[in-house]
Each structure stands twice: as structure tokens, then as C-alpha cells.
Amino acid sequence: MTRAQRVRVAVRRVHLWLGLSVGLLFAIVGLTGSVLVFYPAIDTALHPGLARVPAGARPESWQAVYDALRRDHPGRTGAWRIEVTPEGGPIPIRYYTPVETQGRDFAPLLLWLDPVSLRAVRSGFWGGTWTSWIYDLHYRLLMEKPGGTVLGVLGIVMLAMLVSGLWAWWPRSGGWRRSLAWKRRASRSRRLYDLHKWSGIGGALVLIVVTATGVMLDLPDQVRPVVATTSPLFATPKVASVPRSGGFLPLDVLVRRAGAVLPGSALAWIETPADARGTVRINLMVPGEPSRRFPRSNVWFDPYDGRVLAVRDERRDSGGDTLLAWLHPLHGGEAFGLVGRWLVFVSGLLPAVLFVTGVWRWRLRMRSAAG
């Protein structure tokens, strides 16, 4: 046996044992990821109250939305985060510091308001809804921040499994036609191999990108310092307002001013002050940003007099910040629109196919060897 043959055999064994050890987890992460590609639409379909809100309906003003929140939740005096969806309809809102979930790393109150009546049509806490539970399973294995670290490390193992599978399959010179052949009338073991092979080849590029970006999203405390060594990263400004009589300016005034600061942008989120010294943060998507739902451009205001306290324009970000801004849109496919989402959706199904065909074929070979 030549050295090249010995290396190939060793890589195949590594691929096999990696598949048997983390393949099931890879399948679970992939399937939950496929669900999350379209989770807002799935959420709406599962909750008739959301579907009954007139399509395209929008609130009369964002200040009215904030006033309704303070009216219905007088004890929740912290910051509210109001999502502005491009299609209108129910208004998704988050309150990040509910007393009911104190002690949990991330468990905001979730509300959806009818934009006409400004009454809640749905409410719950993160982790208590089906799709947020799926999100926690996919992102942190239901173990909060430590689970994210564990999954990030295991994601590196999954990358090694993908690469070793490609390496083990990669044909020798002149062997491409035979390596790509699909033998329909072959044995069951061979048919399983062909299905496993084509699932891996067909989805390799997307799976590697999705897995690599997932690792980086799961390990921000490790990734950001590495990126910062080559490119300076944006630091969230430490801004505060000066309390004074007269109260806050209407949110709609600040929204218009934010649009003037970043012309051509689209409104994405409005974050209200957390306390008397808090600020209003208007989150906008400027042309060219990869994510519509979670853009990086922001304008911070003093809510009393409307002074601009800080601005972040994603178009002026460093290369490192641009890299980080693309992670989530690439991971979920949003960066390439509906086509990208469907690619990620289908790729999320492939780890389950790879695991089932790989284990099935391995068991057939073990039985054959034992018999």
C-alpha cells in the first residue's frame, strides 16, 4: 500500500468515527436550522391571532405604539425594542428585562401588537414558544451561553467531518467519471454509498459555509479578538441623556431625524430609553447591508432634545466589522434573498440524509464482515 493509499484509508476512518460520534447532533442542528430559515412565517401560521391582523396594516404612529406598551405594562419601565417589518401586519416587540425570567441569559418578553387597535394579539417569553425553543436548541443546545460554546467547538468537529469526507472521496487523476457514477442496479450498500456521496458533494459548499459561520456566531468571545487583531472593530458608544423637564420627544420625530442622518435607509428597529438617562436607538438598514432584519447601522438620540449622540453607518465599517456583519445573513441565507434561504433550507436537511445513509451502510458492512 502506497503512502497516498494509507492516508486515504486513515482519512476515511476519521470521517467514519466523526460521523458516528457527532453525526446525529449535526443532523439535529441541520433540521432545526432548516426550520429557522422561515421561522417568522412558520410562527405566523401556527398562531391564528397573528394571521387575523389585516395584511399590510401599519400603526398610526410609533409613539402611539410606545404609549400603548406603557399603558398596558406600567411596571415594565426598561427599554422596549420595537421591530418595523417591511410588510406591515402584527408588530413584533421585545422587552429584554422581564422579572419573570431573571437569572436566564436570554429570555425576553415577546409581544405582537395589532397595529390598528394597539392591543396584544400574542405574548410569551423566549423559550416558551415553539420557534424560540427550536432556536435555543439550534443555537445553544438549550444550555444558554455554555451551550453556545459547546456547540461552537463541536461545529469545528463537524467541519472536520465534512472536509474529511470530501478528502476521502476526492478521485485520483483520471478517476472522476467512475467516482461520480451512480450505480442504480448495484447492491444496497453501493446505492447507500452513492446517495451519501451525492448528498455530500451536492451540499458541500453550502454546508461548509453554514457550518463555519455557525461556529463563528457561537464563539463570539473567541472570534472577535482574533478579527480585531487584523481590523479594528466598532465599539458600541457609551452615550447617555441628561434628564430634564418636559419629557421625551415623540418617537416619530426621532425616526424622521434618523432617516435624515442616513438618507435612503430603511427603518428596522426602535429601541426606547431604559431609564431617565437612557437614549433612543434607531436601527436602520442602509443600501448594501446584507441583513434587512438585523442591520448594523444605528443613530443614537437624546430623547429630550433630539440631539444626535452617535452614529454608525455600516458603509463605513472596517473590513472586520463587514466580515462579522455577513455571518448571520450567510448562515441563514438572507444575504442572497429567497434563493439563498431555500439553499440553506435544503442544506439543513442533508446532514440527516448523510447520517442515516452513513450509519445504515456501516451497519450493513459490519453485518457482512461478521457473517
Image (spheres, rainbow, N blue to C red):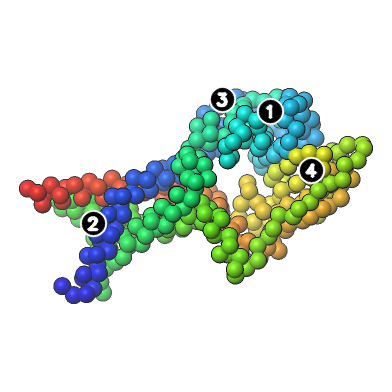
Q: Sequence order check: which comes first, mark 1 or mark 2? A: 1
CA neighbours of label 3 inside 10 A, class few (<14), some (14 to 19), many (20+): few
Q: Sequence order check: which comes first, mark 4 or mark 2? A: 2
Three-letter amino acid code of the residue under disc 2: Trp
Could you tell me which residue is drawn at 58 percent across and 64 percent down? 227
Q: 131 or 202: nearer the eye?
A: 131
User: In the rendered image, which quarter contains the N terminus?
Assistant: bottom left
Q: Does residue 219 lie above or below 242 as drawn? A: below
The residue beneath circle 2 is 182
Q: Sequence order check: which comes first, mark 2 or mark 3? A: 3
User: Quick check: can you spot residue 228?
Assistant: yes
Q: Does residue 109 lie above or below 266 as drawn? A: above
Q: Does residue 3 lie above or below 76 as drawn? A: below
The residue beneath circle 4 is 278
The residue beneath circle 1 is 114
- The image quadrant of residue 80 is top right
Q: Do the residues labelled 1 and 3 touch (CB within 8 Å)?
A: no
Three-letter amino acid code of the residue under disc 3: Pro
Q: 86 or 169: nearer the eye?
A: 169
Q: Which mark is residue 48?
A: 3
Q: Sequence order check: which comes first, mark 4 or mark 3? A: 3
**Residue 52 x, y percent position in the rendering:** 61, 25
**Residue 331 x, y percent position in the rendering:** 51, 52
